Image (tube, rainbow, N blue to C red):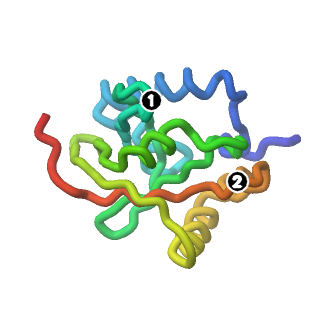
Amino acid sequence: MTLTSVSDWTPPDWLIPWISRAHVVLYKLSTGKLGGHVDGMPCILVRTIGRRSGKPHTVCLSYLPDGDSMVVVGSFGGADQHPAWYHNLRANPEVIVRDRERVFWATAETLTGEERADLWESRTSSAPRYARYQERTVREIPLVRLRYSRPYTG
């Protein structure tokens, strides 16, 4: 396979957690100046509560602006299972979002039907790798809207 850009490369499964942790640390230390964009897409930090552990977990995700909300993609590189953060927010949809210096609570909602189809088309046109990820798996890759609910004061 010939790579045409960094977006054509998916790291091996064992490396993804290490990349994710490093990305979160760089984003936090630089308030998003480092890690605030990946492959031309803006990124946010999303803190979920583990559905089994009850402990907070933070991941850095690219997003698609959607009015006052943000839409994130549960692609997991086209793996056959959903990413852990998606399972966590399905169990507890109240999450904390950090968009550079702005930190707030949001409510997560998995998109379905025509709304999902329209946003999927928009996402895959601006980032074609997501269409390739969908080709790798039989599961439907979820799109999740993060809707602002209140300021984070903690």
Q: Which quadrant: the N terminus? A: top right
Label 1 crowd (10 A; few <14 / some 14-19 / many >=20): few
> In the figure, 131 relative to 20: above or below?
below
Q: Which quadrant: the C terminus? A: top left
Q: Identify the residue at image location x=66%, y=42%.
A: 81
Left or right? Give the position of 55 relative to 72: left
Label 2 crowd (10 A; few <14 / some 14-19 / many >=20): some
Q: Determine if residue 27 is in view.
A: yes
Give the residue number, with chain letter if any, for mark 2: 139
Give the residue number, with chain letter if any, for mark 1: 52
Whichever of labels 1 and 2 marks the residue nearer the N terminus, that label is 1
Of 143 and 99, the residue lying toward us = 143
- Which three-letter amino acid code belongs to the residue tagged 1? Arg
- Which three-letter amino acid code belongs to the residue tagged 2? Arg
Q: Identify the residue at image location x=45%, y=44%.
A: 37
Q: Identify the residue at image location x=39%, y=30%.
A: 57
Name the secondary structure under disc 1.
loop
Give coordinates of residue 96: x percent, y percent: 28, 42
Give coordinates of residue 24: x percent, y percent: 41, 29
Q: Identify the residue at image location x=22%, y=41%.
A: 101
**Hey, which quadrant is residue 99 in on the image?**
top left
Name the secondary structure under disc 2.
loop
Of 151 and 107, the residue lying toward us = 107
Give coordinates of residue 61: x percent, y percent: 47, 43
Left or right? Give the position of 106 relative to 64: left
**Which mark lies nearer to you, 1 or 2?**
1
Residue furthest to the left in view is 153
> In the figure, 21 relative to 149: above or below?
above
Q: Determine if residue 26 is in view.
A: no
Q: On residue 144, which mark appears?
A: none
